[in-house]
Amino acid sequence: MSTGRFITLEGIEGAGKSTAARFVAEHLRGLGHTVLATREPGGTPLAERIRALVLERGPEPVTPVTETLLMFAARALHVTNVIAPALVRGEWVVCDRFTDATRAYQGSGRGVDPALIESLAHAVHGALNPHLTLLLDLPVTEGLRRARERSGVASDRFEAEAVSFFEKVRAGYRGIADAEPARVRTIDALRPLPEVQAQVLAALRPLTRGAA
Ligand code: T5A
């Protein structure tokens, strides 16, 4: 029987998800768990090609529904070929973004019908949902400042969006956290890194304690 756990990290651009994901994976490995660290969109060779398509800045407009379908196309590959098999093997999966990102970016940010998103989520991953989601929350201007400080100018199609878009995304994420407090733990990502890491460890503890 599977003892694997599925942990996702979410938040706006520059919130510190990748930094926190590495920290979580190292912490879990230190506890003796086998960890698969992965990301969305992406995580398989074909899904990484979809990622490149959906992030690239090109002349042709990408409709919100197209964007949603591409996210779920990549996710279907990722869940079937990587995430589900790892969980069955009893591994801990640490994933940088998952379906909450579609809810927040395409749903709250772009205005895609939540019923369409939930229908696709059901078709693609059914009852497979994260055991724990860490929402790294911080003001939009600080997230964008960190992201642009790291990578220079806006480096992909999303980072080029206006602050007002990310305000809607952030509000969407906070709505998810309010609706699902047992799954989603909000981390104050504005704090210095050691304090963020302490919050992450506290959020992980109930899960790691139950799987010693
Ligand atoms: N997307 C994705 C959708 O629209 N729908 C979907 O369904 C999915 C899955 C790519 C894009 O795809 C969209 C959302 C995204 O726009 P991504 O690769 O996760 O997703 O891209 P980003 O969010 O752009 O990832 P970033 O790498 O920019 O942000 P992170 O991972 O949140 O931030 P991180 O860890 O790289 O940190 C940024 C900088 O801040 C520093 C780090 O050292 C780094 O320099 N930092 C801190 N500085 C001060 N204090 C702290 N506490 C810090 N923590 C980190």
Image (spheres, rainbow, N blue to C red):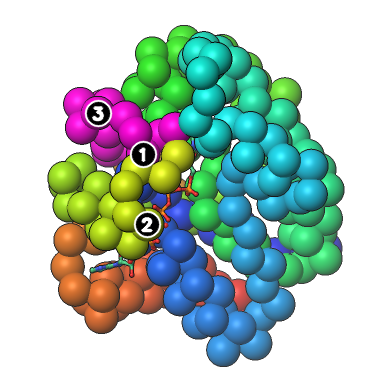
Which quadrant would residue 175 be assigned to in this image?
Answer: top left
Q: Is residue 157 something one can see in this rendering?
A: yes
Q: Residue at x 60, y 75 (%)?
A: 211
**Residue annotated with mark 3:** 162
Q: Is residue 159 magenta?
A: yes
Judged left or right of residue 179, residue 26 is right
Q: Nearer the viewer, residue 175 or 15?
A: 15
Packing grade of label 1 (10 A; few <14, some 14-19, many >=20) is: some
On screen, residue 76 above or below 136: above
**Between tags 3 and 2, which lies in front?**
2
What predominant SS class does the magenta segment belong to?
A: helix
Q: Which contiguous range is marked in magenta?
A: 157-175
Q: Is mark 3 within 8 Å of ligand 1?
A: no
Q: Secondary structure at mark 2?
A: helix
Which labelled disc corresponds to residue 63?
none
Disc 1 to disc 2, how far (Cα)?
Answer: 10 Å
Q: Is mark 2 within 8 Å of ligand 1?
A: yes
Picture coordinates of residue 77, whole percent (x, y) = 78, 39
